[in-house]
Amino acid sequence: MRILHTMLRVGNLDQSIAFYTEVLGMKLLRRDDYPDGKFTLAFVGYQDEKEGAVLELTHNWDVDKYDLGKGFGHVALEVDDAYKACEMVKQRGGKVTREAGPMMHGTTVIAFVEDPDGYKIEFIQKGSW
């Protein structure tokens, strides 16, 4: 068994695809409309779905905003340099919600950014954990 993807419901699919591809550097792997169900699925990731886990962005056509609830935590991405990754996000118009630095009570270097729908993405610096 392996993890295939994590699904996030998004209010504005084009805005979300732009964030994940233009700000975080992922690739749009596929996008499919389902007119009978009134939804679109877009898969984004750093590698093909056959090679690793990706994100599924689900857009229900009649919904433009979701209550994120308290159950979801974050998606974690390994980065070479969390400090540089935060600067890149800011330069590309993204929102950094926790600047890079050691985690509380530890030495792992982390940072957090937020996508257009408010989902948290954690950067974990390679080699620091």
Image (cartoon, rainbow, N blue to C red):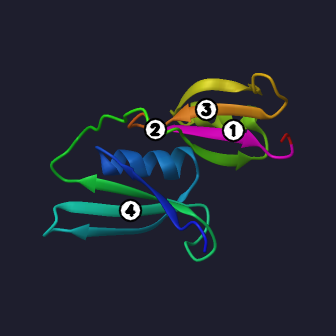
Mark in front: 4 vs 2: 2
Q: CA distance from mark 1 to mark 4?
A: 24 Å
Percent x, y of residue 78 = 71, 48
| Whole-percent x, y for residue 18 in the image | 43, 48
Counting residues from the start of the chain, the first of labels 4 and 2 encountered is 4
Residue that label 1 marks = 85
Q: Secondary structure at mark 4?
A: strand
Separation of disc 2 and disc 1 at Cα?
Answer: 17 Å
Task: Check residue 119 in the rendering and tell me which mark sits there, or answer none.
Answer: 2
Left or right, residue 105 beside residue 4: right
Query: Mark 3–mark 1 contact, CB under 8 Å?
Result: no
Q: Which residue is mark 4?
A: 42
SS at circle 1: helix
Describe the element under mark 2 as helix, strand or loop.
loop
Mark 4 vs mark 2, CA separation in Å? 16 Å
Residue closer to the observer: 77 or 103: 103
Residue 84: x and y, percent? Answer: 74, 35
**Residue 30 lies in quadrant:** bottom left
